[in-house]
Amino acid sequence: MTYLVDAYPAAANSNDSSFAHLLKCVRCHGDFDFTEYAHSNISRRIDARMKLVGIADMDTYAEYLQSTPGEAMALCNAIWINFTSFFRDPSVWSYLRTCAIPELLARLPADAPIRIWSAGCASGQEAYSIAMLLSAALGPFNFARRVKIYATDVDRDALSTACLGVYDYRAILDIPIDLREEYFTSTDDTWRVRPGIRHAITFQLQNILSQRPEETFDLIICRNTIIYFQIQAQSRVLNCLRSSLTKEG
């Protein structure tokens, strides 16, 4: 089976003492460690946050972060990349729908459970996308009986959106019309995921750099996440994903 991961070389570590000190402050006050993230990526978002609060010097901003309640969390939210969409990159989802999922189902016993991990799920669109494809392939009864999807991310706010399963009209435009009509209900300008899909997914706060699920999975999707890590962390995460994948997965 194809193991779908987007991974590209990450930037080298920054040696700037002010930058290192700021990351230490974020770890202490925001309870999140960015030291294994590619520093070239997060430094741009730190700069944007500093401009937003009107501070040009990183050491001054570190002092501001330590003395201002909520600023560390605001910076974390600014750094985390939560852009996602339903069926993002259509060719990938076309491959899943026409090749990967049929091959996976052919390999598994007819009544076997199907376990999916969406790692770095952000606000949930990826997890709901794979759920719709599996429901369409299996039918609602077998989907509800067999499929469990484990969707994880580090961003509490994004996970709250994912758990609600409510999106505006712009967010659902990329969903094929047949799937949209089958798996969503609309109210005014919002669209809500139907319970048959929502109940198959467990959303959970988890840092892929330091945590992993205890079980193994038949399909793992981790897209546009690993590119934000340094190369050593990328290797470790890839090994984690590989060891979490079943032989048939």
Image: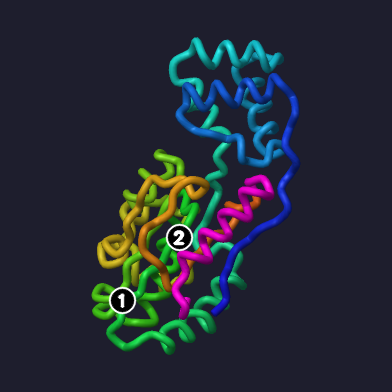
Q: Is residue 169 left or right of residue 35?
A: left
Residue at 74% across / 43% down in the picture? 11
Which residue type carries mark 1? Pro
Q: Tell me the SS state at disc 2.
A: strand
Residue at 39% across / 75% down in the picture? 134
Q: Is residue 148 left or right of residue 31?
A: left
**Is residue 188 among the parts visible in the rendering?**
no
Give the foreground label among 2 and 1: 1
Q: Is residue 91 above or below residue 103?
A: above
Q: Is residue 75 magenta?
A: no
Q: Which residue is mark 1?
A: 113
Residue at 40% across / 62% down in the picture? 128
Which one is earlier in the sequence, the residue at label 2 or at label 1? 1
Q: Which residue is mark 2?
A: 118
**Alpha carbons under labels 2 and 1: distance apart:** 16 Å
- Alpha-carbon neighbours of circle 2 within 10 Å: few (<14), some, or many (≥20)? many
Residue span colored magenta: 228-249
Which residue type carries mark 2? Ser
- Alpha-carbon neighbours of circle 1 within 10 Å: few (<14), some, or many (≥20)? some
For the residues bearing labels 2 and 1, Cβ distance under 8 angstroms: no
Residue 200 location (% of width, % of height): 30, 64
Residues 84 and 64: in front is 64
Q: Is residue 106 above or below residue 115?
A: below
What kind of secondary structure does the magenta stretch mostly adopt?
Answer: helix
